Amino acid sequence: MDKRGNALLSDGSRCIGCFACETACKLEHDLAPDTHPIRAIVTGPLERDGSLVLSFLPLTCAHCETPACVAACLTGAMQKREDGIVFSDPELCIGCQTCAVACPFGVPQLNSKNGKIAKCDGCKDRVDRGLWPVCALRCPTGALLFGSPVRVVQEKRQKEATRVANRLLGVDTST
């Protein structure tokens, strides 16, 4: 049974595309430069109010309820914890990439540094010690929210309500 203790929510309205989340993840997990357990996806440029703008959204593993990557793993390396975190055990991984093919989102990737699968593991070792995932910790704009699902949703609602109120009141928050 999935007993989700924490959630990681991406708020694209706050992401500036600095890639601090990607860099922090790679350093924390000793990943090759071409491995991306979290990605700041770029959209645009699109025209908005007569200007060209880029939008960014940090995306990572969804830690699925029924993960196809876990079901497809031949060695049992891809696992799901009781709290919902899906991870790959490097001791069991043989780098066959069956999990990567099975994942509908293409999340698991081969880490060329060690020939093992890399994917977001929710920074499970950090979270087990009461710490935030490194991507959320290093995000300078708060685009990555972490905590209990109730707290994360409440914080997102509060930020959105503040944004709407400021817009209605004509408050300039761009600086």
Image (tube, helix red, strand yellow):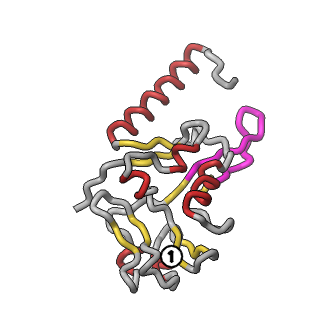
Q: Is residue 41 left or right of residue 97?
A: right
Give the magenta part as a residue range. 41-58
Q: Quadrant of residue 22?
A: bottom right
| Front position in the image: 74 or 102 | 74
| Relative height, residue 103 to residue 12 (above, below) | below
Q: How many badges with numbers are in the image?
A: 1
- At x 66% / y 50%, what residue is drawn? 19
Compared with 86, 101 (above or below) is below
Circle 1 Cα neighbour tier, 10 Å, few/some/many (<14 / 14–19 / ≥20): many
User: Residue 171: image x %, image y %?
Assistant: 61, 16
Residue 4 in percent (x, y) is at 30, 53
Could you tell me which secondary element the residue under label 1 belongs to?
helix
Looking at this rendering, what residue extends furthest in the right direction?
51
Across and down, in percent, residue 36 comes to: 60, 63
* Residue indicated by mark 1: 100
**The C terminus appears in which quarter of the rendering?**
top right
Q: Amino acid at mark 1?
A: Ala
Residue 54 on the magenta segment = yes
Towards the viewer: 113 or 143: 113
Give how far across and how far down residue 47 sits, in percent. Answer: 73, 41
Q: Would residue 57 be found to the left or right of residue 6 on screen?
A: right
Q: Is residue 80 magenta?
A: no
Q: Main secondary structure of the magenta part?
A: strand
Q: Residue at x 35, y 78 (%)?
A: 71
Q: Residue 72 appears in which quarter of the rendering?
A: bottom left
